Image (tube, rainbow, N blue to C red):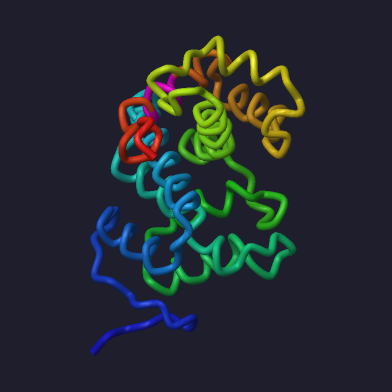
């Protein structure tokens, strides 16, 4: 017998921080390639950050991978969609509360949950930054993130018309809340994404 949530999603067998179960859930709910790559980018950035704060890379990675899994189906940010739908589904599936709370804390304006732990603060700090770094990569002639440097990111950072939807001030505040200087924060995320360029479609072959 297959167990399903109230939204009809299949409940996969899982351990506490089961990456395979997380990917199964993401894949079931998301088909849009850019959104999938975004969640993967946040995953690798979270895994890179975990050791800095003595965190478990598996836990931090699963949080990053799952954080937007409901967005394609429920993109409304008015309290009727993401991330509240995802939070409910995760609880129905029995995911650990530490994961559910971290995902709730990446949208405090909707959930009322403020990021408090290093893992929760890191998720907020890396979320939009991964998208900005990808955007910088896409405008490179090679479209290869290996050719992206901190200096090129900082140059685009100052161009407010570039990737205008990215809230640079929020990233800056989140990095400060995490206690990491902005340049170092960008470098950590950039290095993580460069190390996983093919997975993220940023190796110039697409």
Examine the image and state in which quarter residue 74 appears: bottom right
Residue pictured at 34% horizontal, 32% vertical: 197
Quarter that holds the C terminus: top left
The residue sitting at the bottom extreme is 1
Q: Is residue 199 visible?
A: yes
Residue pictured at 71% horizontal, 17% vertical: 158
Examine the image and state in which quarter residue 75 appears: bottom right
Question: Would you say 112 lies left or right of 66 here?
Answer: right
Q: Is residue 189 magenta?
A: yes
> Is residue 162 depicted above or below 66 in this figure?
above
> Is residue 119 depicted above or below 27 in this figure?
above
* Residue situated in front as seen by the camera: 62 or 91: 62
Question: Would you say 147 lies left or right of 185 here?
Answer: left
Residue 85 position, x and y percent, is 57, 69
Majority secondary structure of the magenta segment?
helix
Quarter that holds the N terminus: bottom left
* Residue situated in front as seen by the camera: 84 or 37: 37
Examine the image and state in which quarter residue 104 appears: bottom right
In magenta, the rendered stretch is 188-193
* Residue situated in front as seen by the camera: 63 or 152: 152
């Amino acid at each position: 017998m297959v167990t399903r949530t109230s939204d009809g999603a299949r409940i996969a067998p899982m351990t506490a921080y089961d990456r395979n179960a997380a990917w199964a859930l993401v894949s079931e709910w998301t088909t849009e390639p850019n959104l999938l790559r975004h969640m993967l980018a946040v995953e690798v950035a979270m895994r890179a950050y975990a050791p800095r704060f003595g965190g478990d890379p598996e836990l931090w990675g699963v949080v990053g991978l799952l954080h937007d899994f409901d967005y394609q189906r429920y993109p409304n940010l008015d309290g009727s969609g993401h991330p509240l739908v995802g939070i409910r589904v995760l609880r129905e599936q029995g995911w650990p509360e530490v994961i559910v709370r971290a995902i709730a804390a990446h949208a405090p304006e909707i959930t009322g949950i403020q990021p408090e732990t290093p893992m929760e603060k890191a998720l907020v700090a890396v979320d939009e930054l991964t998208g900005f770094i990808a955007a910088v990569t896409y405008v490179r002639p090679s479209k290869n993130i290996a050719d992206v440097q901190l200096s090129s990111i900082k140059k685009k950072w100052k161009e407010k018309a570039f990737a205008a939807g990215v809230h640079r001030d929020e990233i800056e505040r989140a990095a400060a809340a995490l206690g990491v200087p902005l340049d170092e924060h960008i470098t950590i995320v950039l290095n993580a994404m460069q190390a996983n360029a093919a997975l993220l479609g940023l190796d110039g072959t697409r």
